Amino acid sequence: MEHGPSFEGKIVSIFGAARREATVPTWGSKFADRLEPLARQVRRVDPRLGAQSADPKRAIAESDTVLFAVTPDEQINAIASEHGEAFHPDQVCIECSTTKRQIAETLHGFDRRGMSVCSIHPGARADLPARGQNMLIMPVGTNGEAAQAQARELAALLQMNPIEFITLAQHARAMAVTQTLDHALQRGKIHALAATLKHFGLTFAQAETMAFANTRIGALGTGRVAIQAPSVSAKIIRESQASDDTRIVLDALIAALTRMRDGDATALVTMFQADMDALDKDGSWREKMLGRTRSVLEQMANLDIRGMGIYSPENKPGTLEKIAGVLSKNGINITAITSHNLEPEEGRTGVVFLMGIDENSAYDLERLKGDLAKIGASEE
């Protein structure tokens, strides 16, 4: 076996490759789905697969690449301890987890044995579209070049953005900025909202109904955290609590909230202006956010007023033009369009378009379905 930047022709063993449910992917199953058409063989190692799971020791011994996507993250340590003799110096090891502190020494141990090791961290949940999301790629030790190349290839297969300026040693700091701050803010907001609504005698549904533009935009971030298990937020926050170096993000947040509770208007204006001068002195970020948030708010409004979903098994130039022609023929005026490119684990190929349509558009639904069927599309 030889190191190579491509998975083509390689035997790849993936630990944690079972789906959570029949149709809900994990990162392990997502990697396996993408690599099976490319690699010589993909071996899925996961006790949830029962008899279909590959034997872990044999899978490690016979593989060119071993990819870990197990939960909890520290399970990697147990696998390395139990099957350590099966690993060999000419292997690539790619590790995918959310926290690295507990497993860093195991990864460095692999590197010292001559293996090529790279740690990755996808910046989105596995059951959501990967396209356009970020993936941290962090080679480990002195032999990481081959593993880093394969990690880049994984990112490309998933259409994710490779982020390579963060090292494994800096991972906890990166997570304090990109995860802890947001999870702490959103969980604090949820807690405060629950207490405040109860005190005011209002319901959550009423709060949503009367939401202003800033609240509607903010609810997207809150909702993204809320759909995750509370244990996810607790683990992320606990990781930052574990070190004085990363606990600073929680201390800074608490200090800011305390100043907002106790400060007068003049002091708060001074504080807020100083913060923006430190982050965005020329205003370019705010200008970018103005355009983005305006687009999102308008699209949300158009889809909420009246919308429909249209599925096409084809996803190629001209697909949207055909669908738009059918809608026009049926007297439907489109006010918003967003698309979702279907991923392999979703069980079908193609694209789903979500369309906002003019509330004054009148059409015959059965005729529309028939016309869509003629071009191979369907209303969802």
Image (cartoon, rainbow, N blue to C red):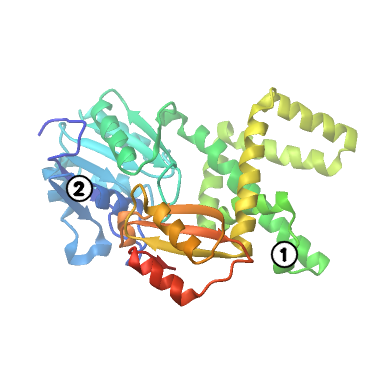
Quick one: label 2 or label 1, which is nearer the N terminus?
A: 2
Where's residue 174, x and y in %? 51, 34
Residue nearest the observer in this picture, 356 or 373: 373
- The residue labelled by disc 2 is 13
Where's residue 301, x and y in %? 64, 57
Q: Which residue type carries mark 1?
A: Thr
Label 2 or label 1, whichever lies nearer to me, is: 1
Q: Relative to 368, does residue 4 appear above or below in the rendering?
A: above
Residue count near mark 1 (Cα–Cα under 10 Å), binned few <14, some 14–19, many ≥20 = few
Please indicate whether residue 376 sits to the left or right of residue 212 in the image. left
Where's residue 59, x and y in %? 15, 49
Please indicate whether residue 2 sits to the left or right of residue 268 in the image. left
Please indicate whether residue 152 sits to the left or right of residue 57 in the image. right
- Quarter location, residue 77: top left
Residue count near mark 2 (Cα–Cα under 10 Å), binned few <14, some 14–19, many ≥20 = many
Q: Which residue type carries mark 2?
A: Ser
Please indicate whether residue 248 sits to the left or right of residue 375 in the image. right
Q: Relative to 210, does residue 77 appear above or below in the rendering?
A: above
Q: Relative to 133, does residue 144 appear above or below in the rendering?
A: above
Q: Residue at x 61, y 55 (%)?
A: 300
- The residue labelled by disc 1 is 209
Where's residue 133, x and y in %? 44, 42
